[in-house]
Image (cartoon, grey):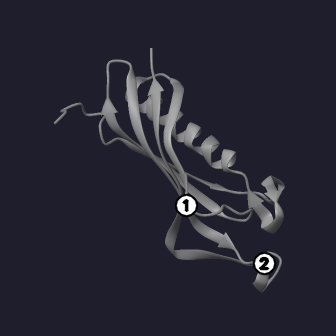
Amino acid sequence: MSTDPREGLTVTHRRYVPYAHAHYAGDLVDGAYTLGLFGDVATEVCIRADGDEGLFAGYQDVIFHAPVRAGDVLEASATVTRVGRRSRTLALEARVVCRGRPDRGPSAAEALAEPIVVVTATGTVVVP
């Protein structure tokens, strides 16, 4: 078991998904939007862990579990699971925590009692 204090470090961001990002019928948002959020949390992980923005080297095991829609509030988290000499492995997860409810009115929305996991992945970042 590693004793590196960076292992277990978690960063979480929340972001409202604007309707301008709806790309498909039903106000669906493309998967790249969530991957962009993963890049943002990974950058903060690198800053906090290593004092550098680092570079995202790649994704493994990206799984799209449920749709993301305009009007959602997404929560994206990155947790350091392995620390190498220059690389860091991250467990990534995005959840919908609030969802628009256009069936109740044009600006209706609700906070979800249980978040919906929409995307999971493993990522690798490198730092100088």
In the image shown, does 74 or 92 lie closer to the viewer? 92
Q: Nearer the viewer, residue 52 or 29?
A: 29
| Number of numbered markers | 2
Q: Position of residue 73 (x, y in %)?
A: 63, 62
Task: Please name the amino acid that badge 2 sits on.
Answer: Pro
Q: Is residue 108 left or right of residue 88?
A: right
- 88 sits left or right of 72 in the view: left
* Residue at position x 18%, y 32% in the image: 3
Q: Earlier in the sequence, mark 2 or mark 1?
A: 1
Q: CA distance from mark 2 to mark 1?
A: 22 Å
Percent position of residue 68, x then y: 66, 61
- Whether residue 53 can be seen here: no
Locate residue 7, reporting x and y percent: 29, 37
Residue at horizontal 58%, vertical 74%?
Answer: 111
Q: Is residue 123 above or below residue 108?
A: above
Where is residue 38? Give x, y as percent.
Answer: 56, 42
Quarter of the image where one finds residue 100: bottom right
* Residue 41 visible, this angle: yes
Crowding at label 2, few (<14), some or many (≥20) Cα neighbours within 10 Å?
Answer: few
* Residue for badge 1: 65
Residue 100, relative to residue 47: is it above or below? Answer: below
Residue at 16% in and 36% down = 1
- Mark 2 = which residue? 102
Secondary structure beneath dot 1 equals loop
Amino acid of disc 1 = His
Quadrant of the frame with the C terminus? top left
Residue at the far top: name it: 128
Left or right of residue 82: residue 38? right
Looking at the image, residue 1 lies above or below residue 107: above
Q: Nearer the viewer, mark 2 or mark 1?
A: 1
Residue at 77 percent across and 83 percent down: it is 103
Q: Are the residues at dot 2 and dot 1 in contact (C-beta closer than 8 Å)?
A: no
